[in-house]
Image (cartoon, rainbow, N blue to C red):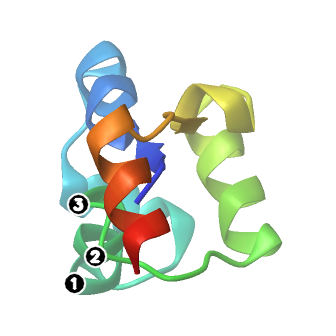
Amino acid sequence: MPIAVDIDVMLARRKMSVGELADRVGITPANLAVLKNGRAKAVRFATLAALCEVLECQPGDLLRWEAADAEDAEDAADG
């Protein structure tokens, strides 16, 4: 997926555990792990806002777009 999730980076910078972040945001550690590991298909704006508030960061600190490499693009074009 071309959207990369950098929650790990912010957790390390804030010296915070996944469990503590989940508690402070109000989501389960399992749901946070799904988001953190890039397996989520969507994220609610309310959850993103809560993550940003707790981690004292901007949404762009947590999510970034990565271009697919040329081989992936060719495979997609070939169908």
Which one is in front in this view, the residue at disc 1 or the one at disc 3?
Answer: 3
Tally the numbered discs.
3
Tag 3 or tag 1, which sits nearer the N-term? 1
Q: Quadrant of the N terminus?
A: bottom left
The secondary structure type at the circle numbered 2 is: helix
The secondary structure type at the circle numbered 3 is: loop
**Real-space Cα distance between discs 1 and 3?**
11 Å
Residue in the picture at 67% in, 70% down: 47
Image position, residue 49 (x, y; %):
77, 55
- Give the numbered dot on residue 34: 2
Residue type at numbered disc 3: Asn
Left or right of 39: which side holds 27? right
Give the residue number, with chain letter if any, for mark 3. Answer: 37
Residue in the picture at 54% in, 65% down: 25
**One can see residue 69 in this view:** no
Give the residue number, with chain letter if any, for mark 1. Answer: 30
Residue type at numbered disc 2: Val
> Going by the picture, which residue comes out furthest to the top?
13
